[in-house]
Image (cartoon, helix red, strand yellow):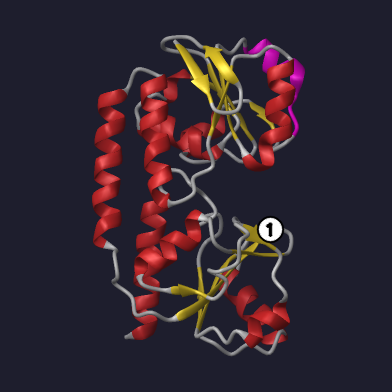
């Protein structure tokens, strides 16, 4: 397949890759959702959805590669994201590997577009279009279900990270009917000033902890208490809203239900 990528220019990739190393969790999850999991021969340490991926060799962290293992797998396609993985992308291209970078979505509709993009790249167009259509219908049903509460969203990524204009997460909150207190900031992701959070007086706090930890809600409530924050709090299981694979829409449905229970 010959194509032109916005960043890399002309690319020539296999018409239907059979040995895929996926270093992007969203891409890995999409391949399995499209029934292409048998083609995946390696993953990153952060590719753990679905559970079937856990039997695959771990080729990389998010930004560092085990080069000898990667080459031994003899991939005919390496999938990677952009954003934080940009430097790794350049290393892989410089090493002459068959790389395709999947764009970082600017809205939840970008997640759907990436599903179709990967389906087209791998000869699974029909399945990709059906999956995208099904998820779009589910997303559409969430429109405006929540009152326009002012919300502060925080990811624990080794410290607090929030989102502003241009983030697919902020767009998703708006879709639900919520108002992100930092929606006007022209930064997709940033470290918030916690005093500024207080000044902006959110009515609800949404907190996404690191995944796979015990007593997530208990830890989150203790953290909010240490800051003197008393607003209603919603805590998920971690790596849900920060994850932009097909499961994002299921996680968004879960968030809507959590907030509805608070309101009820």
Left or right: residue 253 versus residue 44 is left
Q: Which residues are magenta?
A: 64-73
Asked where in the image residue 159 lies, by quadrant, the reply is bottom right
In this view of the protein, can residue 203 be seen by the observer?
A: yes
> Where 121 falls versus 179 (above or below)?
above
| The one of 66 and 213 positioned closer to us in this rendering | 66
Q: Kindly identify the residue that appears in the image at 71 percent across and 26 percent down.
A: 90
Q: Is residue 69 magenta?
A: yes
Q: Which residue is labeled 1 in the image?
A: 157
The image shows residue 89 at horizontal and vertical percentages of: 67, 28
In the shown orientation, is residue 219 left or right of residue 16?
A: right
- Magenta stretch: dominant secondary structure: helix
The residue at 49%/49% (across/down) is 106
The image shows residue 82 at horizontal and vertical percentages of: 61, 37
Estimate the x, y position of residue 139 in percent, counting from the top left.
30, 55
Q: Indicate whether 66 appears above or below 180.
A: above
Mark 1: secondary structure = loop
The verdict on residue 231 being magenta is no
Q: Is residue 115 left or right of residue 92?
A: left
Direction from residue 154 to residue 144 in the image, left or right: left
């Amino acid at each position: 397949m010959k194509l032109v990528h916005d960043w890399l220019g002309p690319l020539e990739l296999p018409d239907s890759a059979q040995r895929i190393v996926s270093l992007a969790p969203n891409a890995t999850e999409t391949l399995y959702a499209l029934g292409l999991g048998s083609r995946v021969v390696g993953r990153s340490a952060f590719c753990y959805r679905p559970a079937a991926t856990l039997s695959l060799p771990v080729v990389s962290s998010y930004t560092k590669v085990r080069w000898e293992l990667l080459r031994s797998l003899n991939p005919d396609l390496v999938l990677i994201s952009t954003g934080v993985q940009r430097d790794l992308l350049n290393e892989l291209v410089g090493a002459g590997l068959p790389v395709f970078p999947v764009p970082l979505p600017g809205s939840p509709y970008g997640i759907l577009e990436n599903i179709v993009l990967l389906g087209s790249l791998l000869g699974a167009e029909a399945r990709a279009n059906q999956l995208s259509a099904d998820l779009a219908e589910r997303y559409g049903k969430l429109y405006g279900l929540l009152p326009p509460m002012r919300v502060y969203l925080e990811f624990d990524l080794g410290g607090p990270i929030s989102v502003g204009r241009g983030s697919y997460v902020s767009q998703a909150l708006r879709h639900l009917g919520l108002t992100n207190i930092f929606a006007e900031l022209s930064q997709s992701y940033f470290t918030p000033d916690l005093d500024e959070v207080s000044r902006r007086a959110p009515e609800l706090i949404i907190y996404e902890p690191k995944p796979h930890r015990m007593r997530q809600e208990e830890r989150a409530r203790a953290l909010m208490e240490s800051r003197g924050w008393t607003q209603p709090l919603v805590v998920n299981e971690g790596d849900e809203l920060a994850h932009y694979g097909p499961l994002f829409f299921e996680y968004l449905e879960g968030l809507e239900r959590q907030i509805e229970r608070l309101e009820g």
